[in-house]
């Protein structure tokens, strides 16, 4: 009489997958079995499977991921071709470079929850701008980068040239003018890694950033004569539509698709995911495929009208995701979760 073969347990499957990887991945396979922990591992395996099938991945960055030094893992993901495009807030674009040139002047405030209003005022008077437990030094970080980027804004304005916000940052980094000021290993700067790869980078709502404010001031002072010297968010959407259709066309010749890995909510995620319904409905291109993978890491819980906390299935009704799109939601702190997922994908 034949005995019924027992199906492999999930932990056994995960252990087998992690066996050829490093200690971080083996730790995940052993301990991350349920609830948000299981979702982390499922999303990491889905990411890896998506790439193995020939897919590309777009990553979105909200929050203060650069000040959290996500570049420690994100930069290597870029170098190893595990990320093919990034959409980020203006804050994440600039704060990675702030950290690159002023890291030694940053101050950590581990007791930030106990700060009084007087404590906060004292930080202001020292020109230390607080992001949760980390203070960014205005002079060493913000003003140093302002000086470097202002030169590029003025030069482009006088030459009648126009560039996107990320292109100005790429130009500054590629010029080498900041190299003598680096205070971290440059391999830990994700914007520098993106510049070296010429990675497609989109920064919607860039005006809502420190450098965006500085640019507005430069226009008001008439140092920059044409406000349109820095290209706009609408132009970024046009760029994204071109990137998506070109990538989809190439992938249709194989078997891959374009994935969407969202860190946090807000404009960084809301802006790019809308490109597919725009292509379908407004440009009448129904042949363009939906996003082929979706993962969101957020501590925003599902609630009435909370777009950042909306479950992925809601996106089906908007023509962004399909019924069969692999979908993952991890309700946790991205500074904890994202490096672990990246570690799995990198085989660490």
Image (tube, rainbow, N blue to C red):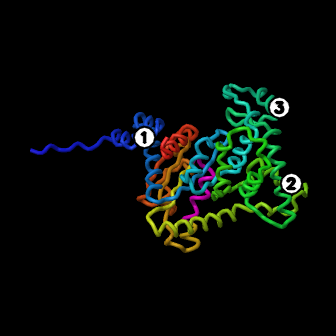
Q: Which residue is mark 2?
A: 218
Query: Which badge, 3 or 1, comes first in the chain's sequence?
Result: 1
Camera-nearest residue between 51 and 115: 51
Instruction: Say few, some or many: other residues with alpha carbon within 10 Å of mark 1 (under 14 / 14 to 19 / 20 or more).
Output: some
Quarter of the image holding residue 109?
top right
55 on left or right of 215: left
Camera-nearest residue between 325 and 196: 196
Q: Say whether marks 1 and 2 touch (CB < 8 Å).
A: no
Q: Is residue 266 one of those drawn in magenta?
A: yes
* Gap between marks 2 and 3 measured at Cα: 24 Å
In this rendering, the answer to whether 122 lies above or below 76 is: above
Camera-nearest residue between 136 and 192: 192
Give the x, y percent position of residue 217: 85, 52
Q: Say whether marks 3 and 1 touch (CB < 8 Å).
A: no
Which residue extends farthest left? 1
Q: Image point 52% across, 68% down: which residue?
A: 250
Question: Which label was assigned to residue 38?
Answer: 1
Question: Which label was assigned to residue 126?
Answer: 3
């Amino acid at each position: 009489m034949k005995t019924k073969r027992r199906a492999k347990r999930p932990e056994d499957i995960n252990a087998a997958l992690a066996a050829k990887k490093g200690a971080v991945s083996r730790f995940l396979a052993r301990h991350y079995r349920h609830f948000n922990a299981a979702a982390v591992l499922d999303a990491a395996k889905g990411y890896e499977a998506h790439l193995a099938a020939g897919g590309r991945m777009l990553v979105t960055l909200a929050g203060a991921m650069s000040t959290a030094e996500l570049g420690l893992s994100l930069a290597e993901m870029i170098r190893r071709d595990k990320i093919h495009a990034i959409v980020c807030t203006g804050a994440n674009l600039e704060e990675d470079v702030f950290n690159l040139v002023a890291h030694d002047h940053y101050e950590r405030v581990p007791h930030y929850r106990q700060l009084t209003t007087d404590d906060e005022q004292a930080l202001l008077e020292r020109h230390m701008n607080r992001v949760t437990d980390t203070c960014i030094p205005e002079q060493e970080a913000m003003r140093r980068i302002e000086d470097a980027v202002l030169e590029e804004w003025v030069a482009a304005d006088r030459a009648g040239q126009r560039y996107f916000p990320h292109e100005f940052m790429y130009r500054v980094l590629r010029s080498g003018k900041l190299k003598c000021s680096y205070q971290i290993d440059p391999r830990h700067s994700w914007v520098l890694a993106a510049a070296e790869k010429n990675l497609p980078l989109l920064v919607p709502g860039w005006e809502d950033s420190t450098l965006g404010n500085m640019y507005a001031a430069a226009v008001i002072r008439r140092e920059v004569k044409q406000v349109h010297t820095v290209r706009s968010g609408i132009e970024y959407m046009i760029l994204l539509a071109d990137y998506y259709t070109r990538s989809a066309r190439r992938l249709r010749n194989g078997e891959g698709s374009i994935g969407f890995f969202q860190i946090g909510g807000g404009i960084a995620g809301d802006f790019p995911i809308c490109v597919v319904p725009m292509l379908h409905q407004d440009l009448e291109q129904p042949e363009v495929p939906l996003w082929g993978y979706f993962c969101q890491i957020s501590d925003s819980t599902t609630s009435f009208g909370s777009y950042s906390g909306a479950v992925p299935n809601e996106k089906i009704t908007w023509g962004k995701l399909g019924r069969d799109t692999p979908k993952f939601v991890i309700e946790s702190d991205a500074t904890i979760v994202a490096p672990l997922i990246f570690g799995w994908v990198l085989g660490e």
